[in-house]
Image: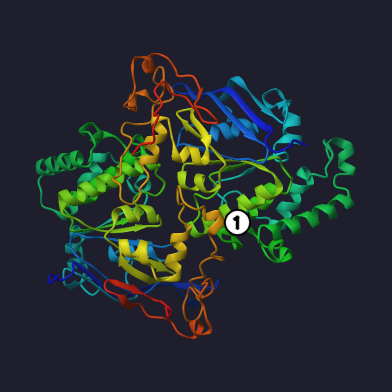
Amino acid sequence: MSQPPLLEVEGLSRHFPVRNTFGWHTGALRALDGVSFEVRAGETLGIVGESGCGKSTLGKALAGIHAASGGRILFEGTDITACSAVQRRSVAPKLQYCHQDPGNSLDPRWTVRRSLAEPLIVHSALTARERNARIAKILEQVGLPLTHLDLYPHELSGGQQRRVGLARILTLYPRLVVLDEPTSGLDVSVQASVLKLLRELQAAFTLTYIFISHDLSVVRAMCDRVAVMYAGRIVEEAPTETIFAAAKHPYTLSLLAAIPNIGGRRITDTFVLEGEPPDPVRPPSGCRFRTRCPRAAAVCAGTDPPLRRIAPGQAAACLFA
Amino acid sequence: MATPGDKLLEVEHLYVTFATAAGAAKVLDGVNLTIRAGEIVGLVGESGCGKTTLANAILGILAGNARAEAGSIRFAGEDLSAMPRRRMADEVRGRRITFIPQDPFGSFNPLFTVGAQSRELMKWKSPLRAPGQGRGIAGFFARYPRARRRADAEAIGQMLRSVQMPDPAAVAAKLPHEFSGGQRQRLMIALALLPQPRLVIADEPTTALDVTIQAQILKLLKQLAKGRGISVLFTTHDLGTAYEICDRITVMYAGQEVETAPVDDFFGRPHHPYTVRLLESLPRPGRELREIGGEIPRLIDPPSGCRFHPRCARASEICRRERPPVTSLGGAHEVRCYHPIEAAPA
């Protein structure tokens, strides 16, 4: 572990301004509030949480789609939040973002060939012939026949569209890929083939993944480490086996208790967590989970628990962990 | 009243085709489905397998280009496919059979308060309303008798409390956008249960929700349905949620039901090759992912014989030639396959 991490995130924040009817700035929606983690080359880090917890904002901030409101992102040792636009663009081929819904993120009026060529035209100096050779090779690796090059996105199935979306980011040989909900909305059998493909591509291209998902069973199958987010914060981070075997944060435990468990006890008999995530514009004081937490005490309202080491490789943001 | 265990809904050999520009798509191909009184039945299958079409056929709201070619839908002793449209709309749809949609965001009218929408529902679908009341010229003058209006308002308040929405008066005065997704799905459940139906059709009611909210909604739905003895047809593509809530599961593939079994039997000893592959494609710890391979068949020219045979490792000559009949494997376990898998796969 002497190698420096591929990606270091320190205190990353992203606040969206909230305005009233007159356009006055009345507050901030803290979508990301001081998030820190590291990703080492070759590993898969899972980011899980419910909708609105800030996991997609995190992915987009890493990819440069959202500017950070605070904090630093160090990619291969350089701070990409502080560098110039030209420098940032030179990082883009190595740090790619894969959209949640490729059906809507592919241009409906472009053929697959044109969509795949675009990143190469922007970011590389390849000739048209070299581009075509690269595209053909990538397309084969994502498991699509060459005949699909001249089809339009609407002529492809959901699974095939995801493959094209993946091919599109792989043409530049990235090092780190942010996968935003890569299997949401897919049937289980298609999901299985997409997950298998992601693993094969990771080996073939020596990729590092940041795998954003709300589905814990998928994260368990894919990730080496997991970070659990709640209301803009990371509340627990640990190796995947530890999260599933010995999670310490009450929110992580509730998330685990909510997964349908085929063959086991029914969650409809056992699940106890009440309420819904807080309004991100007006989060509760102190610990943000305390309004739903079964272990909340008076001290939780006054102290905002920091993410602290509780075991080797495991960190949790809870006073009682 | 039927006692629990009686057959409430019986769909037999239902064929539905859709006229499309490319030809007639055989979306339902001889489907059978039984729901007993008080039972929660899961209708599981991948997108395009026909589960929504089956739900719509039961409710009598098939699309304009769809046609029920053959088969019967018997509900509480009556044949719904032969029922006059007006009676179906007046007494069955939204009254004895209600519906919980997949998307709680798009299913409310954004311009009216939740209270106004539930009162409108009760005006026409209240269990206290006599059939035909409020229709025609006579109805114009005595549309909504005051006594019934009071009783209905009381029922709405009670129902909001039983779906765990505190303070019914405040809830009723709010517009749909003021609620979160989970709360809106609770309200949808309330609206579906207000007419005191015998059967609720829930079309993927939790797919748009987060896991913790999904767990809350599943728990609520199960508790309310079991408490009131209401049958539920729960369509989903998620085998996990089906395990949590259902008593019995029917799996559909390309317009046919391929396997039906009580829930523990279904997950413990699946027999149809498609079911087995579907269960294997779920990510589970300590096991490699297996995909099914191949693609879902086109419904315009489906494969001959068994519709699953092009993707099936056990397919033989007869599977290509003739469609397998539904056979019982003892108990309530039924499967549509010539070569069902006998032992549970390791």
Can residue B229 be seen here? The reply is yes
Which structural element holds mark 1? helix
Residue toward you, B158 or A141: B158
Residue A307, compared with residue B99, is above or below; it is below
| Subunit that carries the residue with mark 1 | B
User: Which residue does the image show at 40% across and 41% down from the upper left?
Assistant: A187
Looking at the rendered image, the quarter that the C terminus of chain B falls into is top left
Q: Position of residue B34 (x, y in %)?
A: 61, 31
In the picture, residue A194 is in which quadrant? top left
Q: Position of residue A244 (x, y in %)?
A: 36, 61
Residue at (69, 33) in percent of width and height: B6
| On screen, residue B228 above or below B265 | below
* Residue B114, position as x, y percentages in the image: 68, 57
In this rendering, is residue B194 above or below A27?
above
Name the foreground residue: A267 vs A46. Answer: A267
Does A204 sit above or below residue B333? below
Residue A89 vs residue A252: left or right?
Answer: left
In the picture, the quarter occupied by the N terminus of chain B is top right
From where the camera sits, is residue A109 visible? no
In the rendered structure, the answer to whether residue B200 lies left or right of residue A169 reads right
Tell me if B90 is positioned left or right of B53 in this view.
Answer: right
Is residue B79 rendered to the left or right of residue B250?
right
Q: Residue at x 41, y 81 (%)?
A: A305
Q: Amino acid at mark 1?
A: Arg
Residues packed near mark 1 inside 10 Å, few (<14), some (14 to 19) or many (20 plus): many
Residue with the mark numbered 1: B184
Asked which quadrant contains residue A245, the reply is bottom left
